[in-house]
Amino acid sequence: MVESIVDQDYVVVDIETTGLNTKKDEIISFASIPVREMRLHMDESFFTLIRPERFKLDSIKYHGITESDLMSAPTFGEVAEKIEEIARNSVVVGYAVHIDVEFLKSAFKKKAKKKLKIDRYLDVAEIEYWLLRRRGSAVNFRLDFDSLLKIYKINGFCRHSAMGDAFATAYIFLKQLSQLQEYRIGLTDLMRIGKKVRFF
Amino acid sequence: MLPPSDYLTKIKPFSFLDEEQIDELIKNMHVSLYKTGKTVFKKGKVLDRIYLVRDGELGLFDGDDLVEVIGNNEFTGLASAIKKERTEFEGRAISDTICFEFRARDIEEMMSRNREFAEFIEKILRMRFSEIFHFEEDELMALFSKKVSDVIFRDPVTCDPESTLGEVVRLMRDNGVGSVIVINRAGNPVGIITHTDIINALARELPMTSRAHDLMSSPVVAVDLSSSLLDAYIKFIESAVNHLAVARDGKLAGVITIKDLMKSFEPRSSLLNYPKIVKKMEDIDQLENLVNEVMASMKNMLRSGLNYETISAIYVPVFDQILRQILKKTSKAGTTTAIIGDFGRRELVIPPVYRLLIIEGEIDDTGFSDYYSVIRAEELADRDDISDLVELADSRYLLGSGARYVSFKENIGREVGNKKEEVIRLMKRELKERITPDNCDRWIERTVRLWTVLNGEFTSRTTVERIKSMNIDPEILSLTAEVYSAVKLIRLREKIFDGRSRTDSIILKKSVGVIRSFRNIMKEEMRAW
């Protein structure tokens, strides 16, 4: 028997970091929105800024987060428990989500001195590749986040903030879930589709 | 700033909220995807959220009947969520639909904090549509509500019926006026002598000793000093004159001329010219062009926030006049004709197409027959259809023998009175009709006509007058009248501006709800019959 993808609890996650190096750079904000029974629960969404140990000015400019915002923010150690609770029992969903998961795991190890267990996560770009192929479309373009926004006709959702991107991602994911349901995809298949490694 | 606030700030009434307030709404929002066919909310529930359709279509169903469709960027559930009423319909996704769902509590909270937001929602809830239309200029409205007393300054120049032509001419010259009012000994205006009358007198080579009562036009068309400029405007159009006597308690108080009015109305006074233009037009083609011109002049009126009744009161006399001018050329001597249908009730429809009833005589085919359709009284008698007969309640006299018309109408009234059972059956059938945004105004027109006929009245009145004369819950009556006017205005706007605005669509949908409650009350009332 195939477990229904609608009954599974998901949480869409987006982080902003000081850079792209998962070893050296730090998380400076975290946003999450739970998705249950085909519904985004903004009332249970969570957002926090996180005070990094070292400040890197370049990316700070990019995110629109200022140094003084961060000065008063909690440290990763202070929010780790909450993040762990959010991720527990849910499938984590994001765009290029493996990077976010890497960052989170690394931060847990270094700053919370414990291991974060996230073994089930889904990438909306991977799901979109699968959907496009399933519909017989040759995917010969880069499925970056902007392309996804275009495909799903999303605007006015405040990009470039962790919460804005999380919301857009969650919205995309909701529509993807609806399509996957029509293809009668079960949870096991979905986990494979959303994680599949491509060779091109 | 929370997502998706940029999106919400573009949608009424969220556009009235500031960033912080929008964020508060979003904080507790749900975003739900409903697969096609899935129930969003059930009938008979008090909702704790309102639903904004972000993408897709939400159908409101009464059993298996689709009552209305809520499309992109429209919302539903307000009445239930805010007024705590039970939902009238079941909400079901017609296609895969994403809704932004806001907590009723949060909306109420915003209403208590943001006046504009609250007013917009209250308007929708109370369906005070006419106010929603007032977004644009209401300067014309302000003008129309001015009083005649605001624009007349001079005392009237008068003479008595025995004054001579020579005296009248001197009065005009000495006072620099274009008209002299003839008053009797009691001070009541009995006639008016204008430049035109003087020229006519001279052309007829009348002696300078001729008496005023032989020169004057009478009776004098008069307005009351306290009337609005709108009343004066309509009088000018209806009677095609240049001067109106202004009376206070029946006594002459002044004169208002078309020029006085034009000064106030420039540049919107063009309608005032039409009656005289129409009178001079001989050619049917010219009249056809004039009809188009009159329609074009409606744009400003429709933007002005005037209600449907007022716009009808302004335009129906203009179109009537054009019709009379056409029939002058095409009807044979001894023809008696009445107007039935919308124009019979003095209700404006666009394009203007008159329905004429020929009681006796004949009208030729003209090149401009788009303007009216003709039915003969005998044909109606042959058809012997009760709904045809009831429709004749809307008829009003147009030309020919007045006495012939009156006796015709009295006969029909009696006949319908004798067929009360059939009328009741017709009414009961109407009450079962499905009411939609497309037929709701027509449905009201038919049922309130039936209602007044059943109550023994067989005279032509506007639908709103009929609604207001009904003897049921006044609150639902005034709401129904308002909704009816709003729908009729939308019909005009659709034709004149070639399309429907989003607000219009919302209003149409809401109207259907009100009309349904009106129907339910009618159904109750009809049980007694």
Image (cartoon, helix red, strand yellow):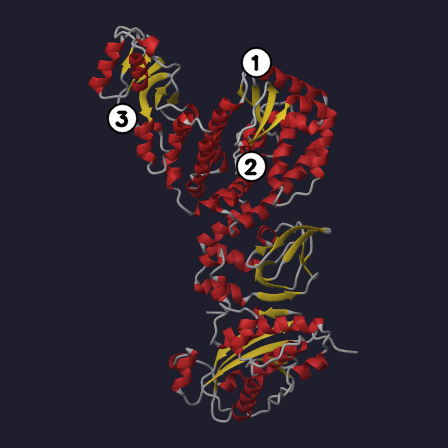
Which SS class for mark 1? helix
* Mark carried by residue B403: 1
Mark positioned earlier in the residue sequence (1 or 3):
3
- Relative to A141, say whether B366 is above or below: above
Counting from the top left corner in percent of width and height, residue B117 is at 47, 54
Q: Name the N-terminal-most of marks 2 and 1.
A: 1
Q: How far apart are marks 3 and 2 (CA)?
A: 38 Å
Instruction: Say if labels 2 and 1 share a chain.
Output: yes
Q: Is mark 3 on a helix, strand or loop?
A: loop
Q: Name the residue under label 3.
A: B153
Query: Residue at point 72% right, 20% down?
Result: B418
Q: In this view, does B37 lie above or below B244?
A: below
- Pointer 3 and pointer 2 on the same chain: yes
Answer whether labels 1 and 3 touch (C-beta < 8 Å): no
**Which class describes the residues within 10 Å of circle 3: few (<14), some (14-19), or many (20+)?**
few
Number of marks in the rendered image? 3
The N terminus of chain A appears in which quarter of the rendering?
Answer: bottom right
3D distance between C-alphas at marks 1 and 3: 43 Å
Please state the chain letter of the residue tagged with numbered disc 1 in the rendered image: B
Q: Which residue is drawn at 65% across and 29% down?
A: B450
Amino acid type for the residue under numbered disc 3? Phe
Q: Name the side, left or right, on which A44 lies relative to B36.
A: left
Q: In this view, does B420 lie above or below B219?
A: below
The residue that mark 2 highlights is B481
Return the disc, 3 or 2, that comes first in the chain's sequence: 3
Q: Which one is in front in this view, the residue at disc 2 or the one at disc 1?
A: 1
Q: In x, y percent, where is residue B318?
A: 45, 30
Pointer 3 with pointer 2, Cβ within 8 A: no
**In terms of depth relative to the viewer, which is nearer, B108 or A159?**
A159
